[in-house]
Every structure is written in structure tokens, then in C-alpha cells.
Image: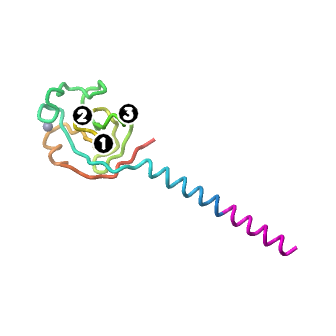
Amino acid sequence: MKVLWLYLAIFVFTFISHRTGYIQGHHAGQLESQTEKYTVTAYCPKECCCGEWADGYFANGEPVGGLAIAAPKSIPFDTVLFVPGYGTATVKDRGGSIKGNKLDVYFPTHQEALDWGVQYLTVLEME
Ligand SMILES: [Zn+2]
């Protein structure tokens, strides 16, 4: 009878450790997929940054303003990203040089874009 209890204890221990291990692994994987390192540059809506595309509209058709991010085509419009130091903003724009792990954050003036410079940041994708 003691042997049976021992088997039962081993079974329960194995079951619980597998379950918690599974949950932890699953959770960690989820968090990992929501954050990504990006090289984040900045731009203003004028010719200095946008050239011929300086028409007062983002690539998604909305007039420029507020907080907005230019992202590669792999990130659809309306995706909400948290960029540390910039804020929680929506992907509204595209850019010829915005490829791979690069983002461009929008500022209303060129000076603000210059002040941002180039930053290597962990960006969180919001639900
Ligand atoms: Zn500019």
C-alpha cells in the first residue's frame, strides 16, 4: 500500500511540474513575441524629411498630426506600438528606408525629429 502512495505522489508531482512548466513557458513565449528591438529614427512632415511625399498626409490617408509611426509593410496600419520615450502610437505611415527592424516616429517639427536622433529600443506591440 505504501508503494501505491509513492507512485501516486510521483505522478502528482510530475503532473504539477509539467503543467506549471508549460504555463511559464507559454507565458514567456507570448511576452517575447510582443516585444522587439528596433532602430527608431524620427521625421517631420516637411520636405526635409519626406521629400516629394510631403503632402500633409500619412500613407494611410490620414492628415498628419498627433503621434504616428512609419513602419515596414510587415506591420499593418492601425497596429498600436509602445515606443519608450515617444509613447503609445499607431502605425500610419510607410517609408522607403523603413525596412527590417526599423521604425520612424513622427514629430510636427524638424527640430524635434533631430532631437530624437537614432535610438535602439525595445518596442512593445499592444493588443
Ligand atoms: Zn524634417
Q: Looking at the image, is mark 3 or mark 1 nearer the viewer?
A: 1
Quick one: label 2 or label 1, which is nearer the N terminus? 2
Residue tagged by mark 2? Answer: 95
Q: Secondary structure at mark 2?
A: loop
Q: Quadrant of the N terminus?
A: bottom right
Q: Which residue lies most toward the right here?
A: 1
Q: Position of residue 75 (x, y in %)?
A: 37, 37
C-alpha gap between disc 2 and disc 3: 13 Å
Q: Position of residue 79 (x, y in %)?
A: 39, 36
**Type of secondary structure dominating the magenta stretch:** helix
Contact, mark 2 vs mark 1 (Cβ under 8 Å): no
Q: Position of residue 36 (x, y in %)?
A: 37, 49
User: In the picture, residue 76 is in which quadrant?
Assistant: top left
Q: Which residue lies most toward the bottom here?
A: 2
Residue tagged by mark 3? Answer: 76
The verdict on residue 31 being magenta is no
Residue tagged by mark 1? Answer: 100
Contact, mark 3 vs mark 1 (Cβ under 8 Å): no
C-alpha gap between disc 2 and disc 1: 12 Å
Q: Is residue 90 left or right of residue 31?
A: left
Q: Is residue 29 above or below residue 4?
A: above
Contact, mark 2 vs mark 3 (Cβ under 8 Å): no
Label 3 CA crowd tier, 10 Å (few <14, some 14–19, many 20+): some
Quick one: label 2 or label 3, which is nearer the N terminus? 3
Amino acid type, residue under disc 2 in the picture: Gly
Label 2 CA crowd tier, 10 Å (few <14, some 14–19, many 20+): some
Q: Secondary structure at mark 3?
A: loop
User: In the picture, residue 57 is in which quadrant?
Assistant: top left
Amino acid type, residue under disc 1 in the picture: Gly
Q: Secondary structure at mark 1?
A: loop
Q: Is residue 11 left or right of residue 95?
A: right
Label 1 CA crowd tier, 10 Å (few <14, some 14–19, many 20+): few
